[in-house]
Amino acid sequence: SITIGPEEHLHIVDSKDQLAFHSKRRDQSEIVDMSGNAIVKKLRQARHGVEIGVDPVEGETITAYATVPEYGWGIITQQPTRASTALAAKNDQLRRLVTGYGLILLLAASAIVMASKLAAARKRAEGEARYRQTLDTMLEGCQILDHGWHYLYINDAAQRHNRRPKQELLGRTMTEVW
């Protein structure tokens, strides 16, 4: 089944350059020689394409053509350019619709990424809080230093052993304090 627009014409040309089918002709019994047609000549050269031309009846038209090499036939479809401006308007409307849906999809994807980052940050904070609580409640002293010997963390037991408040030690080096 081939669906064409209301103003579009479909021609099928056989291997003898005779009109085998025309979508707008009721009487298909008449043999019509198409060998003089410029598009049919291009079909015989196994070419395909789209052209804008002038039809004596329709005026300016858009013509698309392609060969069916297995059979030596050709298919030509033609429509007035005025019909294609309606297609262009529909295409523009479709482009706007796709752009709108694309933006909605982008916004939804961004929300999902932000929500997953927020969930990961919350999970990391919960893990850090659990880790800190474990260190804070230990009976043994725990001191965490960086590579430059700066105090990064001191638990309550270490504070008691050092006999100095945490605030006095944190951020400073061991050599500065002792």
Image (cartoon, grey):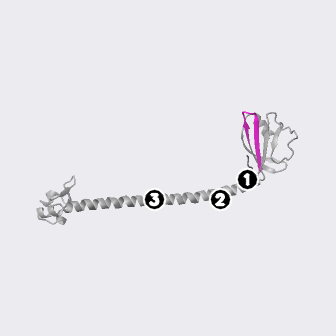
Please say whether residue 156 is one of the residues in the magenta stretch: no
Mark 3 and mark 1: Cα distance apart in space: 41 Å
Nearest to N terminus: mark 1 or mark 2: 1
Residue 171 in sight from this viewpoint: no
Residue occupying the point 62% across, 56% down: 95
As drawn, 52 above or below 97: above
How packed mark 2 is, by other alpha carbons closer than 10 Å (few <14, some 14-19, many 20 or more), is few
How crowded is the residue under tag 3: few (<14 C-alpha within 10 Å), some, or many (20+)?
few
- Residue shown at 76%/38% (left/top)? 74
Q: Which residue is mark 3?
A: 112
Q: Main secondary structure of the magenta part?
A: strand
Q: Position of residue 5 (x, y in %)?
A: 75, 52
> What's the mark number on residue 93?
2
Depth order, front residue of 139/177: 139
Q: Which residue is identified by label 1?
A: 84
Instruction: Determine the secondary structure under disc 1.
Output: helix
Q: Position of residue 39 (x, y in %)?
A: 78, 40
**Residue lying furthest right in this view?**
30
Q: Is residue 85 visible?
A: yes
Eye-nearest disc, 3 or 2:
3
Q: Which residues are magenta?
A: 65-79
